[in-house]
Amino acid sequence: MKYLFLSLAFTICSFLSAQNQESETKSIDTQFKELIESSNSFKEYKVVKKAKIHDLRKNTNEHIEELNKNISSLQNDISEKDSKINTLENKLSSVNNSLSDVNAEKDSMNFLGIQTKKGVYNMIVWSIVGILGFLFVFMSLRFKNSNDTTKETKIQLQTTEEELEELRRKSIEKEQKLGRQLQDERNKVSKLKGDK
């Protein structure tokens, strides 16, 4: 029984609200047309009932108020959306700036306290590597030449020392030989003096 009563009440409410909405949803233009068509004519004039004009006026004012409320609501929505758009644009700008900074940092390196692009950094590093490689090869060649010169000089020094040693030995032998000859000559001289 309760359900039957509830369903009957619901049906009646739906019917009343549908009629109410139908009268509200009629456009102002339609209401004007209905008013003109339902009015009586007198010569070239139309005679309109005051109640109908008051109803039309009331409906028009309500419609205008509703439109004003909608306009106001839409303006509020628009201003809210504008502020959201501005906020999002600011965030997007900030993100773009951050992205630009990150890309700049990614494409550059800190070299001796100076931000340089990777291409310039690579060129500097490879130039330094090239110069160091050239210096290494140059110094290696200089070292090899100096080492070869040192070996030759050592060999010449050893040869010279051997020749000097040979010369000393010969000069000592010569000196000893001359000393013996001198002694022999002294002995001969002393023998000759002793024979006289």
Image (spheres, rainbow, N blue to C red):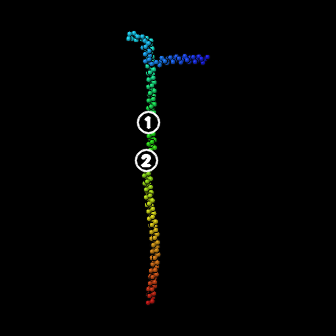
Q: Quadrant of the C terminus?
A: bottom left
Sooner in the amino-acid sequence: mark 1 or mark 2: 1
Which residue is painted at 43% across and 18% down in the image? 29
What is the residue that sits farthest to the right in this orientation? Answer: 1
Using the rendered view, name the quadrant where residue 63 is placed. top left
Amino acid type of the residue tagged 1 in the rendering: Ser
The spot of residue 191 in percent (x, y) is: 45, 87
Residue 93: give its label.
1
Above or below, 188 relative to 172 = below
The residue singled out by tag 2 in the image is 119
The spot of residue 25 in percent (x, y) is: 47, 19
Amino acid type of the residue tagged 2 in the rendering: Gly
Give the spatial CA distance, label 1 vs label 2.
Answer: 28 Å
Nearer to us of marks 1 and 2 is 2
Which residue is painted at 43% across and 56% down in the image? 134
Image check: 156 left or right of 1? left
The spot of residue 193 in percent (x, y) is: 44, 87
Determine if residue 49 is in view. yes
Using the rendered view, name the quadrant where residue 130 is placed. bottom left
Few, some or many residues within 10 Å of mark 2 (<14, 14–19, 20+): few
Q: Quadrant of the N terminus?
A: top right
Image check: 11 left or right of 191? right
Residue 184: give its label.
none
Above or below, 47 relative to 100 = above
Label 1: element kind: helix
Which residue is painted at 42% across and 48% down in the image? 120
The spot of residue 140 in percent (x, y) is: 45, 59
